[in-house]
Image: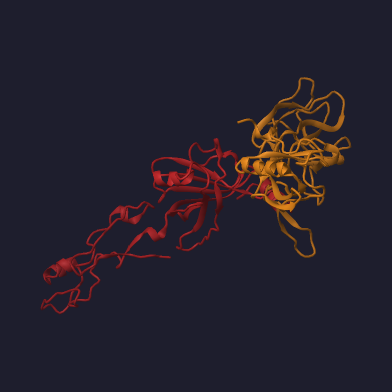
Amino acid sequence: MGASENDILNPDPGHDLNPNYGFIVDRNDPMHRFGPRNTRPVTRLVESEGNRFELTWTSRPKAIVDQLLRWQAQYEQGFFVFRDHERDRYYSGNFIAPLKYSDEAYEKWTVQGIFQEYAGVPMFAYPDDWNNHGVFIEETDDFGNVVPATSGIWTYQAAAPAHGGHEIMNAGTNGVDFATFSYLGYGFRLWLRTQGNFGQCEISLDDAVIVPVLDLYTAAVVASKPVVEHPAVPWGLHRVKMRTLGTKNGGSTDFLISCDALQVMR
Amino acid sequence: MLPANVIAGMKRGSGMMPILLVDVQLADGTILHWSDFEGTFPMKLGVPGEKIKYEAKLKHCGPFRLSRSLKTDAGDVMVHNLSGRAPARDVSSVFAQSEFEGALVVVRWWDIAFEYALWEFHCYWSEPSDGEQEVGGRLLQLFDPSQLDAPMDTYSEQCTLEYKSERCGSTSAQLTCAKSIGDCTVRIALERFNGTPHPPPVNLQTKSASNSNVVVRGGGQHGGGIVRVNLE
């Protein structure tokens, strides 16, 4: 059995296996919400259900119908890849119920089905159009609250080179303080600034270390930019953790760690 | 008391909902780690603090009804029974192989970003039920007062029966009885004396949540006795 993330239903944009143009894409609301009167809403991320595509193939020859039915049966307990050519995105999932099909006469058929994307499943290609599909999670939200879950002392402060002009800063002198962003989405880019008195930290994703030592030292001040880019993450609820190490580059004059912004692929 | 940073995070208007972590230790020593969110988290049972994979088998856990009275704190737990080789699926296999009744359970409401248990409930599994698609049970607090056997009468050096009553059974010519074991001996009803002419044994003064019932009987065919009192 090969890797199912390479089994693409509709790799060719001109093929009859592509559904009718204008299909509906839907997704469950991932949040619990409470809208109190006269103040801001309260929300908590709960679910990670992926996108749902309501697809129709009209006036298709029998060979296409047979192929679609075979794909449905082949992967009904597994997954395959559906390509959205308009957005140039690939989604891993399967048809969540048997396909409906009907004969239109003249040897033409109509097929309908729902493709469900699954969380935590490998993908053929991970989305990386950061400019169009990436969203930022800053160190504070629109209401002034610090967003990352923090342990230790992280001081909110203005800093012109930081993304959005602000950051939270830790002394970086121990190996236990952390700041953790939680998000719903695919991969991420961690935006950090660097300068001459910054130390080193560790970056982990969902409790797995992906950068054991991230050195934030540069002799000159460098404005915030993506210093860790990790697009190969399946859809789901994730957490990115910056942990201070209490270490620094030999050239650095201090151990400071700045937590700035996370860009998340949606 | 929760740490200040966790309290600040909980007060925020947005964020991620805490997840449920359930550790189960069966009578044969098997330890299971289940969650409603698959991931690696520090275990409570096993090697405490060491991280282990929690399988996303939990459908729901709760609601828990807590009380400050002698009512038993309790909640429900439900685990899916779909995965594994049919017909002996994962969870039902565990049910079949091991005794779930009385299994030690620790439930935690876990904030994955702060890596902190916001709430923790230590309990034991009762009323296990094995269904086709899900299995479940009731989680009852440790030191469950409904497990205690309470005597019908208070422990006392003196007999509590009415002198010459049917339960006392004495036909003595003595007009009164001091309810002591000495008087009872004279009044020839000793086999129905329901006092305890010595301090109660130490193991009656504290009671563990185990199933070993401590049975203390008063004297005789009609005297004393013990009843199980459900305090719920």
Residue B206 at x, y = what percent? 36, 54
Name the outermost residue toward the top.
A250
Quadrant of the snapshot with the C terminus of chain B: bottom left
Q: Is residue A118 visible?
A: no
Q: Is residue B228 visible?
A: yes
Residue B133 at x, y = what percent? 51, 52
In this structure image, what is the colour of chain B?
red
Name the outermost residue toward the right.
A160
Q: Is residue A251 above or below residue A28?
A: above
Residue B44 versus residue A263: which sits nearer the camera?
A263
Give the residue drawn at x 48%, y 53%: B136
Colour convention of the picture: by chain
Q: In this view, does A16 lie above or below A27?
A: above
Residue B228 versus residue B133: which sits nearer the camera?
B133
Residue A141 at x, y = what percent? 80, 48
In this structure image, what is the colour of chain A?
orange
Residue B155 versus residue B49: which sits nearer the camera?
B49
